[in-house]
């Protein structure tokens, strides 16, 4: 197989694609709130969820005092 880019961090696109979807709405996918009950164990334990695994660095933001993760309590 030959892929354009591995789907791992960092999630930034090339600067030439920065405005590719600027004028288009992006809908939340049907699987956004998937609880993985009907999927393989590996999919459930993978560290790739926006709410649970995204860091401030992934978003290009400075981390405030406190948690490392965007959705940490």
Image: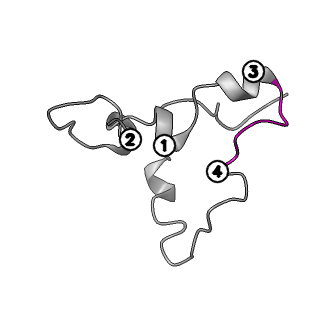
Magenta span includes 35: yes
Q: Which mark is residue 42?
A: 3
Residue at position x 40%, y 38% from top? 58
Q: First in sequence: mark 4 or mark 1?
A: 4
Q: Which mark is residue 24?
A: none
User: Mark 2 and 1 residues: CB-CB less than 8 Å, in contact?
Assistant: yes
From the image, tell me which residue sits under label 1.
51
**How far apart are the two marked residues, 4 and 2, measured between alpha carbons?**
15 Å
Position of the C terminus, as image quadrant, is: top left
Quick one: label 3, few (<14), some, or many (20+) residues within 10 Å?
A: few
**How far apart are the two marked residues, 2 and 1, measured between alpha carbons?**
6 Å
Q: Secondary structure at mark 1?
A: helix
From the image, tell me which residue sits under label 4.
33
User: Mark 4 and 3 residues: CB-CB less than 8 Å, in contact?
Assistant: no
**How far apart are the two marked residues, 4 and 1, measured between alpha carbons?**
10 Å
**How far apart are the two marked residues, 1 and 3, measured between alpha carbons?**
18 Å
User: Mark 4 and 2 residues: CB-CB less than 8 Å, in contact?
Assistant: no
Q: Is residue 42 above or below residue 15?
A: above
Residue at position x 51%, y 57% from top? 17
Residue at position x 48%, y 56% from top? 16
Give the magenta-colored segment's residue range: 33-40
Q: Position of residue 21 (x, y in %)?
A: 54, 68
**How far apart are the two marked residues, 4 and 3, measured between alpha carbons?**
17 Å
65 lies left or right of 9: left
From the image, tell me which residue sits under label 2.
71
Q: Main secondary structure of the magenta part?
A: loop
Q: First in sequence: mark 2 or mark 3?
A: 3
Q: Position of residue 39 (x, y in %)?
A: 83, 33
Q: First in sequence: mark 4 or mark 3?
A: 4
Position of the N terminus, as image quadrant, is: top right
């Amino acid at each position: 197989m030959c892929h354009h880019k591995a789907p791992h961090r960092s999630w930034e696109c090339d600067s030439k694609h920065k405005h590719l979807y600027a004028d288009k709405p992006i809908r939340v996918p049907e699987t956004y709130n998937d609880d993985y009950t009907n999927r393989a164990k590996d999919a459930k334990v993978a560290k790739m969820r926006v709410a649970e695994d995204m860091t401030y660095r992934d978003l290009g933001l400075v981390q405030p005092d406190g948690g490392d993760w965007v959705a940490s309590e």
